[in-house]
Amino acid sequence: MAKVLVTGVAGFIGSHLSRALVEQGHEVRGLDNFSTGSRKNLLAVPVDVHVVDLADAELVSNACEGIETIFHLGALPSVPRSVKEPRPSHEANLDGTFNLLEGARAAGVKRVVYAASSSAYGNQPGFPRVETMKPEPIAPYPVQKLAGELYMQSYWRVYGLETVCLRYFNIFGPRQVPDSPYSGVMARFILQMLQGQQPTIFGDGEQGRDFTYVANAVQANLKAAAAPAEAVAGKVFNIACGERHTLNETYQVIARLLDHEGPPAYGPVRAGDVKDSLADITAARDAFGYNPEVGFEEGLRRTVAWY
Ligand code: UD2
């Protein structure tokens, strides 16, 4: 089977995807600088891991040799991290993406599947979000992720590198880092409740998210990698469930699953936060048969069971 490269291989989504790729019989090479990823995430997964920072253009380029498809998940995630420390975010998310594309081009890689972000839509009016809407990124992180998309599309148009951008909508599940101030909200709330702490909702809790279980993101990657170029190359796709859940509701569901009592605390709205998020997933369905199989509650049940 084909040799594939996964950047961010030891991270949350990267480790799930790598397992699935190995199960499909692919030979997986992986890159990680272990800034947020962990070796534990890859226990018993036969992946050829190289400790490489995406900032190192030469090592990144070497890692692309002999590869047919790249899944580019390596990034420094989090909107608030990018607000607090824009430079390291920029270097990892945008310079790193550029280095990867240059390496891919030089090595004659066929396809790159890129982890883009729903944060690109910002706070413009109009729901659900459709890929043809004009992006309005607010914080540095969405700007970096969106600029990465534009680079992906440019490399398709100019060099014929088949790039596919998957705009993830709040992916959650097992192995998401739970104990950082920049952790995704679900992981954070679960750990805090398990530790008997009172989670804080930033804002009034009525902001909505199209929370998407990680298995759906894995499915999207596998299908986007296998689809004919005419259907996906140079294109952008929302990857979500097509359902909106408020944070107040999310808090209640997690509290019920964990038998946690007591209300959340409320704090100020986070700088750069998006107020609402809901995806139209028709484009991914039509182009490569994406079909989110694990919904919000089932995903949360599986996530809670993992802790
Ligand atoms: C954004 C993107 C998401 C992904 C992610 C990567 C949107 C809509 N989504 O996620 O697709 O790219 O960035 O990092 O832009 N919150 C609390 N309490 C906490 C932690 C968070 O209330 O302790 C709130 C937070 O203010 C926000 C919501 O929970 O309204 C979700 O926050 P998040 O950090 O999990 O993800 P978000 O939406 O920034």
Image (cartoon, rainbow, N blue to C red):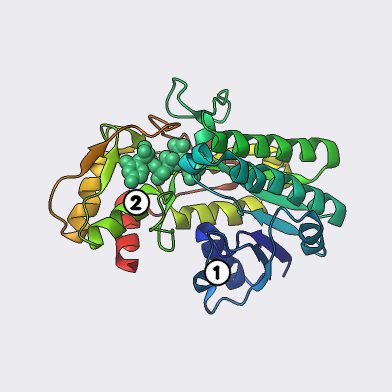
Give x and y (percent) for residue 84.
50, 39
**In this view of the protein, which residue sits in the foreground, 84 or 230?**
84
Quarter occupied by the C terminus? bottom left
Whether label 2 touches label 1, CB < 8 Å: no
The residue that appears at 44% across and 45% down in the rendered structure is 170
Quarter occupied by the N terminus? bottom right
Q: As drawn, which residue projects farthest toward the top? A: 125
Q: Is mark 2 within 8 Å of ligand 1?
A: yes
The residue that appears at 46% across and 55% down in the rendered structure is 214
Q: As drawn, which residue projects farthest toward the bottom? A: 44
Q: Which residue is mark 2?
A: 186
**In this view of the protein, which residue sits in the foreground, 83 or 153?**
83
Please state the quadrant of the image where ligand 1 appears. Answer: top left
* Dot 2 amino acid type: Met
User: In the picture shown, does residue 201 fall above or below 49?
Assistant: above
Sequence-earlier tag: 2 or 1: 1
Quarter-wise, where is residue 136 in the image?
Answer: top right
Give x and y (percent) for residue 255.
20, 53
Query: Badge 2: how crowded within 10 Å, few (<14), some, or many (20+)?
Result: many
Give x and y (percent) for residue 23.
57, 72
Left or right: 40, with 294 as reference point? right
Instruction: Report the mark closest to the observer, 2 or 1.
Output: 2
* Dot 1 amino acid type: Arg
Q: Which residue is mark 1?
A: 19
Label 1 sits on a secondary structure element that is: helix
Work out whether residue 190 can be spotted. Answer: yes
Quarter-wise, where is residue 60 in the image?
Answer: bottom right
Query: Badge 1: how crowded within 10 Å, few (<14), some, or many (20+)?
Result: many
State how far apart marks 2 and 1 are (Cα): 23 Å
